[in-house]
Image: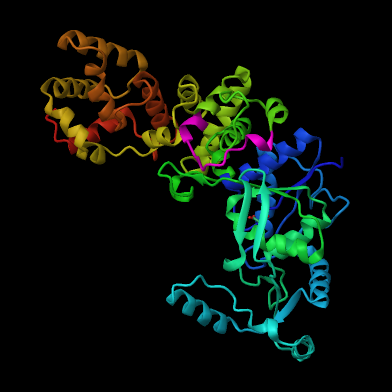
């Protein structure tokens, strides 16, 4: 049997988001499992929306994600070029072929005319589709009008009444052609339409399986019609289910991080993301194994285990897997990784300049400790907010702060604590321990009752990393060089006491 050949065919019009990353992964796993060929094809025929910078980013994102390809724009291969914008000649020849065969025709309808017809159909409650008006123009007349310079698109004649294929995910699938008007193959500006370019390329590149998102299911009949018109054997199709957000609507930016670049910046490891996206629409044959390294993924991957129902994106599970992979790293690599993540986020979010960073060794080390000791669970963005964006007025105005202060014992502990810190504003770790010991003995309180009011006043949060780890961060941050960003403990407490009108 000939080798399996699959392709990932992104349009470089934005960042690689979760859905496309999963498509790329499934194609790659399928090719590697089968010992086949994985191809990267850039679908950049939409000249307005496609940008070379997006292609560069896309390649970098896929490489970071850990995928590779055997043929592609950067690699070349037997069916080069792999960028659709460089294949215009090929599409022109093929559209010419369909016109000469009588399977395609020139359409002279203006955009206004088409729009009016569309609206009319919608008003009448009909599904809009092209009327087929220009099909009736005799070919000689069409050729004459075309050579006289009249703008024209090329359309395919749909002759079948329905389309059928056996989808590798959804099984036998039939779509009636009632909803399908003659599709445009080449637009009036001469640009090939997606369906046309994709079919020509999939055939010429000898693609055996088309694995893509199910948003393309409605394109498949149009593509099958093209295979029929050319007399080509269609590949197999596998349409991957939609990815939903926790609210069960289609996953989008509204749901938070959704692009590979976002996850990378947030410190997700590529192997964790691969593992997670694998589970988003595929399950191991025992129905329960969740943690699979790359070797295991390749060994076990099969199209038969892809799930039909929509997959819900579960950030908690991704974070759990990320923790698993992080803590499997040797300690020095893990530290290195966290260091890069901490410094990356602080610089990227504008909290620190490069220069400040170079002078802030201890301060960074202390943040790092919090992250490492939380086993990666402490969210760096939340932590950064606690450190850099403390505002006593906002904290004092919060409902939970007010409730805390309504408790007389809590208020007393807090006032006592603030008095002591303000009296000797440098709060060392030892002094903090001493003060807490003293307050514990004095009030007979311990644990949460003792620490909670102080945590709120110092960090503005109800929960978080241990106070004894946060205090050195605040103190050193303020001391070192970051006065303009980081407030010391005494500074925070003064601000808080004034805003909460505490009688000190
Ligand atoms: N360029 C299309 C996309 O990004 C490819 C679809 C396909 O795989 O056929 O959605």
Q: Is residue 398 above or below residue 122?
A: above
Q: Position of residue 247 (x, y in %)?
A: 40, 44
Q: Position of residue 214 (x, y in %)?
A: 59, 51
Please state the quadrant of the image where ligand 1 appears.
bottom right
Q: Quadrant of residue 143?
A: bottom right
The residue at the point 42 percent across, 41 percent down is 246
Q: Is residue 44 visible?
A: no
Q: Is residue 193 above or below residue 150?
A: above
**Is 320 inside the magenta-drawn segment?**
no
Q: Position of residue 314 (x, y in %)?
A: 47, 36
Farthest front residue in view: 161
Quadrant location of the C terminus? top left
**Is 316 inside the magenta-drawn segment?**
yes
Q: Position of residue 369 (x, y in %)?
A: 48, 21
- In the depicted view, which residue is nearer to us: 176 or 138? 176
The magenta segment: 302-319
The residue at the point 63 percent across, 60 percent down is 219
Q: Is residue 148 visible?
A: yes
Q: Is residue 438 above or below residue 483?
A: above
In the displayed structure, does residue 468 sit left or right of residue 236?
A: left
């Amino acid at each position: 049997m000939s080798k399996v050949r699959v392709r990932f065919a992104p349009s470089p019009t934005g960042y690689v988001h979760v859905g496309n990353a999963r498509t790329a992964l499934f194609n790659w796993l399928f090719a590697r499992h089968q010992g086949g060929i994985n191809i990267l094809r850039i679908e950049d025929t939409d000249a307005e929306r496609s940008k070379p910078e997006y292609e560069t980013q896309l390649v970098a994102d896929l490489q970071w994600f850990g995928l590779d390809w055997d043929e592609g724009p950067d690699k070349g291969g037997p069916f080069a070029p792999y960028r659709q914008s460089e294949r215009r000649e090929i599409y022109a020849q093929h559209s010419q072929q369909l016109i000469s065969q009588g399977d395609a025709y020139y359409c002279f309808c203006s955009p206004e005319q088409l729009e009016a017809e569309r609206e009319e159909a919608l008003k009448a409650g009909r599904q809009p589709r092209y009327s087929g008006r220009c099909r009736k123009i005799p070919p000689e007349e069409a050729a004459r009008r075309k050579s006289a310079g009249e703008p024209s698109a090329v359309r395919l004649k749909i002759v079948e009444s329905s389309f059928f294929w056996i989808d590798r995910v959804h099984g036998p699938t039939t779509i009636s052609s009632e909803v399908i008007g003659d599709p445009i193959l080449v637009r009036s500006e001469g640009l090939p339409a997606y369906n046309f370019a994709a079919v020509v390329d999939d055939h010429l590149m000898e693609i055996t399986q088309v694995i893509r998102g199910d948003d393309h299911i409605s394109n498949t009949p149009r593509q099958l019609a093209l295979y029929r018109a050319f007399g080509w054997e269609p590949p197999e199709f596998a349409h991957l289910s939609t990815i939903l957000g926790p609210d069960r609507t289609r996953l989008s930016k509204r749901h938070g991080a959704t692009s590979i670049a976002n996850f990378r910046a947030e410190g997700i490891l590529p192997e964790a993301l691969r593992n997670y996206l694998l589970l988003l629409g595929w399950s191991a044959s025992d129905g329960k194994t969740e943690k699979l390294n790359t070797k295991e993924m390749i060994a076990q991957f099969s199209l038969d285990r892809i799930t039909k129902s929509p997959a819900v994106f579960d950030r908690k599970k991704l974070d759990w897997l990320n923790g698993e992979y992080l803590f499997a790293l040797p300690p020095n690599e893990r530290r290195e990784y966290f260091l890069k993540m901490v410094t990356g986020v602080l610089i990227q979010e504008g909290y620190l300049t490069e220069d400040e960073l170079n002078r802030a060794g201890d301060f960074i080390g202390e943040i790092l400790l919090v992250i490492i000791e939380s086993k990666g669970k402490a969210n760096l963005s939340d932590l950064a907010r606690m450190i850099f964006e403390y505002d006593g007025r906002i904290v004092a105005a919060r409902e939970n702060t007010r409730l805390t202060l309504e408790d007389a014992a809590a208020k007393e502990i807090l006032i006592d604590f603030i008095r002591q810190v303000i009296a000797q504003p440098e709060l060392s770790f030892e002094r903090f321990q001493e003060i807490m010991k003293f307050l514990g003995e004095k009030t007979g309180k311990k644990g949460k009752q003792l620490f909670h009011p102080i945590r709120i006043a110092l960090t503005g949060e109800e929960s978080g990393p241990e106070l004894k780890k946060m205090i050195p961060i605040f103190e050193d941050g303020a001391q070192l060089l970051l006065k303009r960003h980081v407030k010391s403990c005494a500074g925070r407490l003064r601000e808080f006491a004034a805003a909460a009108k505490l009688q000190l």
